[in-house]
Amino acid sequence: MNTRILVANGLIAALYVAISLSIQPFAYGPLQFRLPEILNLLIVYNNKYFYGVILGVLITNLFSPLGLLDLGFGVGQSALALGLTILFSRFIKGELNRMVICTLIFTFTMFLIAWEIALVYKAPFWETWLFVAIGEFIVMAIGIPIIYSLNKRLKFKELV
């Protein structure tokens, strides 16, 4: 991994952690709006952003009230969704279309987070999945125009 990729991923991870911890009450639990999930959309521009997002999730989940369990479920869900986005992006033209697919994949795979919350809090699975999926969808849907606009200036594909 070259220095440029390392620095870009370090910045992504740091940004993910900083945003998560600044909104900590909303970043964890059965009803969550984890704003740095917007950074998941960077995978549409370059697969190399995978490492920064995963590292950001891992460090953020070290502070989770769910403890080590959140490391497995949270990192696992992110890795699965990012991997599926990379896979499906090969067949989808256009960055906006890939962002929509990324958003839908992340929304769907929130079943893993719902399962974790259901295990810990004895919450009903389907209701929990609905709530965390809605939160994920809202955050990432809001993120699409933000990341799209930032890309015009920053050119995410060329940064790494």
Image (cartoon, grey):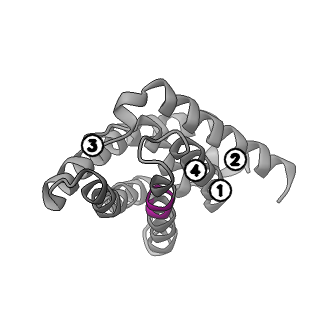
The amino acid at mark 2 is: Asn
- Is 73 in the magenta? yes
Residue 145 against residue 22 in the figure, above or below:
below
Secondary structure of the residue carrying numbered label 2: helix
In 3D space, how far apart are the residues under numbered discs 1 and 2 (Cα atoms)?
Answer: 6 Å
- Please name the residue that numbered disc 4 is placed on: 58
Mark 1: few/some/many CA within 10 Å (<14, 14-19, 20+):
some
- Please name the residue that numbered disc 2 is placed on: 9
In 3D space, how far apart are the residues under numbered discs 4 and 3 (Cα atoms)?
Answer: 20 Å
- Please name the residue that numbered disc 3 is placed on: 135
Q: Earlier in the sequence, mark 4 or mark 2?
A: 2
Which image quarter holds the N terminus?
bottom right
Percent position of residue 128, x then y: 20, 53
Mark 2: few/some/many CA within 10 Å (<14, 14-19, 20+):
many
Residue 72 against residue 64 in the figure, above or below:
below
Secondary structure of the residue carrying numbered label 4: helix
